[in-house]
Image (cartoon, rainbow, N blue to C red):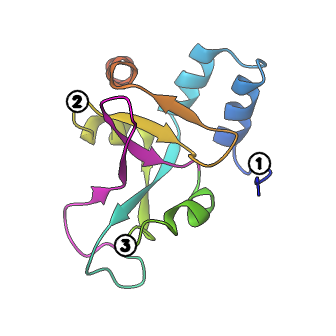
Amino acid sequence: MEQVFSPQNDLERQLLAAQEGQLGEEEFMHALLGAQVFMPIHDKHGIGGLQSSRSATPLTLDSGAGFDVIVLFTSPERAKDFVKDYPGYEGGLLAEFTWVLEKMGSGLGLTLNPGWDAGLDMEPETVQQLLAAGGEQ
């Protein structure tokens, strides 16, 4: 069953506009660099979805193209169905996208809103270019 994507925040509206050709890629990337995203994280000892350890382990998946991707969502609500298949990742954190980029190791890609029509996949090279661009703001 395919879920209908109805935008719930500015980032989602901009993502949809970019996918429909109403917003340029560069404009969307600039908006993404200033946005907050939700990152599912694993914590074996969490209480009520709160993080109890100092090191967050983000949900990463094999892209099938020789690199792993960090899973991000445009809001916590977008993650709910997806993380059901990944026990321990029910919790997460809202963070500035630039913070996530800065904390990512090199060689990682990212996927935004997997399982939704309105999403985005980035290879590691693109992530590094965005990180460089984010530092220039």
Distance from label 1 to label 3 (Cα)? 25 Å
Rendering coords of residue 31 (x, y %)? 57, 29
Mark 1: which amino acid?
Phe
Pick out the residue farthest to the left: 54
Residue at the spot of label 1: 5
State whether residue 8 appears in this view. Answer: yes
Magenta-tinted stretch: 51-74
Label 2 neighbour load within 10 Å: few <14, some 14-19, many 20+: few
Rendered-image quadrant of the N terminus: bottom right
> Which residue lies at the image location 67% right of the left edge and 14% below the top edge?
24
Q: Earlier in the sequence, mark 1 or mark 3?
A: 1
> Which residue lies at the image location 50% right of the left edge and 32% below the top edge?
121
Residue 88 disc label: 3
Q: Earlier in the sequence, mark 2 or mark 1?
A: 1
Pick out the residue farthest to the bottom: 47
Mark 2: which amino acid?
Ser
Rendering coords of residue 114 (x, y %)? 56, 46
State whether residue 136 appears in this view. Answer: no
Circle 3/circle 2 CB separation < 8 Å: no
Residue 35 disc label: none
Rendering coords of residue 26 (x, y %)? 57, 14
Residue 96 found in image quarter: top left
Q: Earlier in the sequence, mark 3 or mark 2?
A: 3
> Which residue lies at the image location 66% right of the left edge and 46% below the top edge?
116
Label 1 neighbour load within 10 Å: few <14, some 14-19, many 20+: few
Of residues 98 and 67, which is closer to you in this image? Answer: 67
Circle 1/circle 3 CB separation < 8 Å: no
Residue 130 found in image quarter: top left
| Mark 3 secondary-structure assignment | loop
Residue 106 disc label: 2
Rendered-image quadrant of the C terminus: top left
| Mark 2 secondary-structure assignment | loop
